[in-house]
Image (cartoon, grey):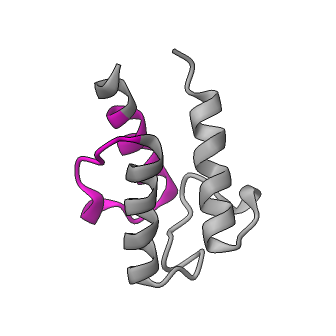
Amino acid sequence: MTLTPPLNQLKKLISDTLGIEINQLQDNADFIADLNTDPLELKDLLNQIENNFSIKLENPDDITTFADLTKQFKQALDETL
């Protein structure tokens, strides 16, 4: 399975939810420091991702950057196959 469509969907969901441009979602982008996301907003976003994609992120409390999220997102998608 190619991950491009799910990753594109993930980026769109994050962009729409946080009100940011997709191009701001660089691997090293920190949700709180760089993208000005409130910690509760981040928690809500992660819950929304789990619900929308029917996945369970392994350690959502460890997600601080977009790279952290994509790593756990890919692992969770692989587990659903």
Instruction: Please check the rendered image and state whether residue 70 is part of the magenta-colored stretch, yes or no.
Output: yes
* Residue at x 57%, y 35% (from the top left corner): 6
**Looking at the picture, does residue 48 appear above or below residue 30?**
above
Q: Position of residue 49 (x, y in %)?
A: 45, 53
Q: Is residue 20 left or right of residue 66?
A: right
Residue name at image x 29 percent, y 59 percent: 60
Q: Residue at x 37, y 61 (%)?
A: 47
The vertical placement of 1 against 74, above or below, is: above
Q: How many marks?
A: 0
48 displayed left or right of 11: left
Is 68 within the magenta?
yes
Which x, y percent locates residue 25? 64, 57
Q: Which residues are magenta?
A: 54-76
Residue 48: quarter of image: bottom left
Q: Nearer the viewer, residue 53 or 78?
A: 53
- In which quadrant of the rendered view does residue 24 lie? bottom right
Which percent across, then down, holds residue 16? 68, 64
Chief secondary structure of the magenta portion: helix
Q: Relative to 62, does residue 33 appear above or below in the rendering?
A: below
